């Protein structure tokens, strides 16, 4: 855990986060965060367009030594503004639902740059994917293979499929984020992969275009990626020996980012060098599926202090953002740096507090045992690294409207999703006929 208050080291690392301090005041690009707060209130999500571009282009540069399609993982942050920006940069999309497919298409990402992952695709979603002509449907079980084949036959089309192989590689990450181990629900077991691939290749309603894997998230070392790649090469070679030529090899994502003081993150340049070298002799296109690494540090959640509360054992700073707005700390014990909008002077005392929200749950917290500069009711705090798995996982628990979302571009900012209202939430419901007259 960090030993210093978050603001003390965040100020010294201006390139890591979208937030930077200028003369002691918090900015996103060239916009003071205080201007966003005064216009829109709190809680509000704020994203830096420039930071998203920078992170995306770093991945493109790292893999430039061979043909590579970067398919952004929409589940990390599906805001239309984010997707449209990435579409203009040339990104494809990795989707896991029919809803994400519609989001990607609406944002302008071409269907031939979209891959469809996920273990539970419905018939409606499969039909939707086949109708628009996706780059590939990533198959995760023998039952799914047969289901896609059946839907393709019914529609009179040939379905492009890639077999997702579970290479049984330990990525040394949070248990909820490890997706490539043998006990995972994802992918086809390595011992069965060749047989299933051959079945797909022989099916007249399917076209086996590639193989795929994804071993997990928040991976900070290159070695697990190389290990998984070497195992995938074995399947590519085995299929080639049987006369089956693949178009693509999908290596997934999972590039780790640094959330807290002293955290390491994946060296993207080193990853790219290793991947390019290990696949130089393969005559196929690579696909990578980064999500968090592109948007996490681009996002900030601003929240206002409501009250301070002290008990015999703890000090609480109660803010207006709760677990319904940002669930990562409660769900994953995820760490998010929390800093004031203005750097405090050295005379301001530092206290160890729990930063908690107003939701009626003991698990509603943004930080535990965190050293922070003394703050008062009405002060505004910035929760950093909130661009991934944050607003996209927000809910209306306790009938709390979800926050507004804002994108900053240079000297300007724009609301890209307005704040919900309670009236809108209730208006989406209706009474059954027998209660309407009550």
Image (spheres, rainbow, N blue to C red):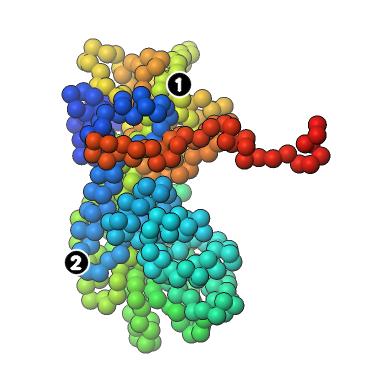
Label 2 vs label 1: CA separation?
A: 50 Å
* Disc 1 crowd, CA 10 A, few/some/many (<14, 14-19, 20+): many
Question: Residue sitting at 33 percent across and 46 percent down?
Answer: 295
Give how far across and how far down residue 413 sits, in percent.
31, 36
Question: Residue sitting at 38 percent across and 87 percent down?
Answer: 242
Most foreground residue, 317 or 167: 317
Residue 172 seen in the current view: no
Q: Is residue 104 positioned above or below 390 on the image?
A: below
Q: Quickly name the residue at label 1.
A: 318
Q: Quadrant of the N terminus?
A: top left
Give how far across and how far down residue 252 sits, in percent.
36, 61
On the picture, is 331 further left or further right than 37? right
Residue 282 seen in the current view: yes
Q: Mark 2–mark 1 contact, CB under 8 Å?
A: no
Question: Residue sitting at 32 percent across and 51 percent down?
Answer: 85
* Disc 2 crowd, CA 10 A, few/some/many (<14, 14-19, 20+): some
Give how far across and how far down residue 296 sits, in percent.
34, 44
Q: Secondary structure at mark 2?
A: loop
Q: Secondary structure at mark 1?
A: strand
Q: Quadrant of the C terminus?
A: top right
Q: Quickly name the residue at label 2.
A: 65
Q: Is residue 347 positioned above or below 261 on the image?
A: above
Q: Is residue 248 positioned above or below 120 on the image?
A: below
Res 129 label: none
Give how far across and how far down residue 232 sits, in percent.
35, 70
């Amino acid at each position: 855990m960090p030993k210093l208050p978050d603001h003390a080291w965040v100020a010294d690392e201006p390139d890591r986060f979208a937030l930077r301090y200028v003369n002691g005041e918090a900015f996103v690009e060239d916009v003071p965060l205080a201007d966003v707060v005064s216009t829109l209130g709190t809680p509000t999500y704020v994203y830096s367009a420039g930071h998203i571009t920078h992170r995306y282009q770093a991945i493109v540069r790292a893999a430039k030594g061979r043909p590579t399609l970067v398919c952004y993982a929409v589940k990390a942050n599906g805001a239309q503004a984010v997707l449209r920006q990435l579409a203009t940069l040339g990104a494809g999309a990795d989707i896991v639902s029919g809803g994400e497919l519609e989001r990607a298409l609406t944002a302008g990402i071409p269907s031939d740059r979209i891959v469809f992952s996920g273990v539970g695709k419905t018939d409606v979603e499969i039909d939707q994917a086949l109708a628009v002509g996706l780059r590939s449907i990533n198959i995760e079980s023998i039952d799914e293979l047969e289901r896609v084949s059946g839907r393709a036959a019914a529609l009179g089309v040939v379905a492009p499929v890639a077999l997702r192989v579970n290479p049984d590689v330990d990525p040394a990450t949070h248990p909820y984020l490890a997706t490539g181990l043998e006990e995972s629900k994802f992918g086809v077991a390595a011992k069965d992969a060749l047989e299933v691939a051959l079945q797909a290749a022989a099916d007249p309603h399917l076209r086996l275009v590639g193989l795929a894997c994804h071993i997990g998230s928040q991976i900070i070392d290159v070695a697990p990626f190389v290990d998984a790649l070497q195992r995938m090469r074995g399947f590519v070679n085995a299929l080639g020996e049987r006369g089956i030529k693949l178009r693509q090899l999908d290596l997934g994502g999972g590039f780790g980012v640094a959330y807290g003081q002293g955290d390491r993150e994946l060296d993207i340049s080193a990853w790219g060098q290793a991947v390019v070298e290990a696949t130089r002799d393969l005559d196929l296109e690579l696909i990578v599926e980064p999500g968090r690494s592109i948007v996490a540090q681009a996002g900030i959640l601003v929240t206002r202090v409501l009250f301070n509360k002290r008990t015999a054992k703890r000090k609480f700073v109660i803010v207006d953002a709760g677990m319904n707005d940002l669930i990562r700390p409660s769900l994953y014990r995820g760490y998010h740096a929390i800093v004031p909008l203005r750097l405090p002077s050295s005379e301001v005392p530092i206290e160890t507090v729990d930063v908690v929200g107003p939701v009626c749950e003991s698990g509603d917290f943004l930080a535990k045992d965190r050293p922070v500069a003394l703050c008062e009711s009405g002060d505004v705090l910035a929760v950093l690294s909130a661009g991934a798995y944050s607003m996209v996982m927000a809910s209306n628990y306790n009938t709390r409207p979800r926050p507004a979302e804002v994108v900053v571009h240079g000297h300007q900012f724009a609301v890209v999703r307005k704040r919900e209202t309670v009236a809108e939430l209730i208006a989406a419901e209706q009474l059954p006929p027998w209660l309407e007259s009550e």
